[in-house]
Image (cartoon, grey):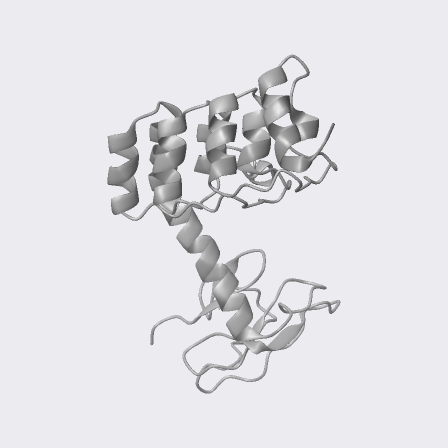
Amino acid sequence: MPWTTFWTRSGRWPANGPGRPAACSTAGSPGSAPATAPPGGGWTTSPGWRGGAGGGPAVTAPGRPGPPGGGPAFTGRVLALAAERLAAPLHAAFFEAVGRGDADGARALLARGADVEALDPRSWPLDGETALMLAASRDDVAMVRLLLAEGADVVAQPPAGWTALMRACNAGATAAARALLEAGADPDLENAEGYTAYGRTPVARTELLDLLSRRTGRP
């Protein structure tokens, strides 16, 4: 009989196989008793988190309840994370192409399945930089227009709340900022720190400040 794998929030054990906690039963497998707690207690079960050939509740980590919302929601999150991890090399190559201004390379990687809205897998996730933000910060107008044509969201705000326009203004990239504004970028959006694109523009970039002033009505 093949082993039944029980998933937990911190690992997995094969049912009836080496490494499975002895006091934990194979809930849901044929002929097994309900899941029981090990000595000292602390094990919980989640009715909606199914595992094993015959279904049933799976054992979770000591002292921790099963995932909120039941099986389908948790499974969806796991699958999304797995897809993101599998796509990381493709997206890393995509961001490298964008970073060096390689339009043909970027198009080829998009054709292979790279997501134009993906966040840079090479950086801390909370930084939340999209390819459009990277191109804008480099003042690469050709790449900005290519990404917009491929469906990049001009007003996207990843976790930190920055937009491509904010990145362009922060870098003093006037040409990229103008292209983004023409594409519908909103100069009044704020990031998590409360800054707008105008607030991130260096004071020495008078042309860019004037451009933003005309769009926002600032003096």
Location of the N terminus (image quadrant): bottom left
**Residue at coordinates 40% horizontally, 54% vertically from top-left?**
83
User: Residue 95's x, y, as percent?
Assistant: 39, 33
- The answer to which quarter of the image holds residue 189 is top right
**Residue at coordinates 72% horizontally, 31% vertically from top-left?**
218
User: Residue 188's x, y, as percent?
Assistant: 67, 40
The residue lying toward the viewer, choosing from 77 and 5, is 77
Location of the C terminus (image quadrant): top right
**Residue at coordinates 65% horizontally, 12% vertically from top-left?**
204
- Residue 89 is at least partly visible in this image: no
**Residue at coordinates 33% horizontally, 29% vertically from top-left?**
97
In the figure, is residue 209 to the left or right of 121?
right
User: Residue 126's x, y, as percent?
Assistant: 61, 40
User: Residue 17's x, y, as percent?
Assistant: 44, 65
The residue lying toward the viewer, choosing from 1 and 143, is 143
In the figure, is residue 142 to the left or right of 199?
left
The residue lying toward the viewer, choosing from 28 and 177, is 177
The residue lying toward the viewer, choosing from 207 and 63, is 207
- The answer to which quarter of the image holds residue 162 is top right
